[in-house]
């Protein structure tokens, strides 16, 4: 049986809807970033760990304005697929989310 590794990505959050909309209005898009593959450690972990590991990287709801309540609903659905002994990795806001969720 493969060892599961689940990575919960990071994101942003804002105190108010107005702050979030202001962020969206002022965010400068770098189109070159969207034209090429990224050297993302989360995605490359699959090949680096090898065939003995199953790396799962769920896309959490609205990572540009993540809310605990929304992520909790998603994690409650995901947890039914998690094996005993899973390795959980939280990146950035994903780490804060996991700490709160697991507590």
Image: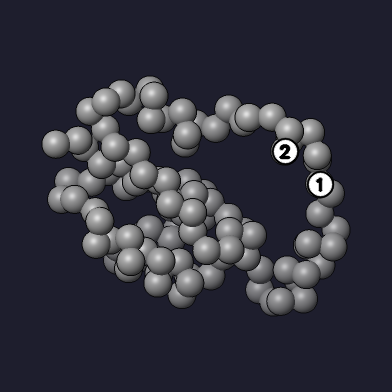
State the image coordinates of residue 75 (x, y, percent, origin top left). 36, 64
Up-down: is 70 above or below 44?
Answer: below
The residue labelled by disc 1 is 29
Outermost front residue: 35
Compared across the picture, whether 43 is left or right of 29 comes to: left
Front residue of 102 and 63: 63
**In the picture, which quadrant includes the N terminus?**
top left
Compared across the picture, whether 100 is left or right of 51 comes to: right
Query: Sequence order check: which comes first, mark 1 or mark 2?
Result: 1
State the image coordinates of residue 31 (x, y, percent, origin top left). 80, 39
Up-down: is 69 above or below 45?
Answer: below
Could you say which disc has been placed on residue 34 in the image? 2
Name the secondary structure under disc 2: helix
Camera-near label (1 vs 2) is: 2
Front residue of 55 and 69: 55
Q: Residue at x 78, y 62 (%)?
A: 23
Up-down: is 50 above or below 26?
Answer: above
Q: Residue at x 17, y 46 (%)?
A: 85
Say which quarter of the image contains residue 24: bottom right
Front residue of 21 and 58: 58
State the image coordinates of residue 76 (x, y, percent, origin top left). 32, 68
Could you say which disc has been placed on residue 80 in the image? none
State the image coordinates of residue 78 (x, y, percent, origin top left). 33, 60
Question: Residues at badges 1 and 2 in contact (C-beta under 8 Å)?
Answer: yes
Q: Residues within 10 Å of mark 1 (few under 14, many from 20)?
A: few
Give the spatial CA distance, label 1 vs label 2: 9 Å
**In the picture, which quadrant includes the C terminus?**
bottom left
Compared across the picture, whether 24 is left or right of 44 comes to: right
Name the secondary structure under disc 1: loop
């Amino acid at each position: 049986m493969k060892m599961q590794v689940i990575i919960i990505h990071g994101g942003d959050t804002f105190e108010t809807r107005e702050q979030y909309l202001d962020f969206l209005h002022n965010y400068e898009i770098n189109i070159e970033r969207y034209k090429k593959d990224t050297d993302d450690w989360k995605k490359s972990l699959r090949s680096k760990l090898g065939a003995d590991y199953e790396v799962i990287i769920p896309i959490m709801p609205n990572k540009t304005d993540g809310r605990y309540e929304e992520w909790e609903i998603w994690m409650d659905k995901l947890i039914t697929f998690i094996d005993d002994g899973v390795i959980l990795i939280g990146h950035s806001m994903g780490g804060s989310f996991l700490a709160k969720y697991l507590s």
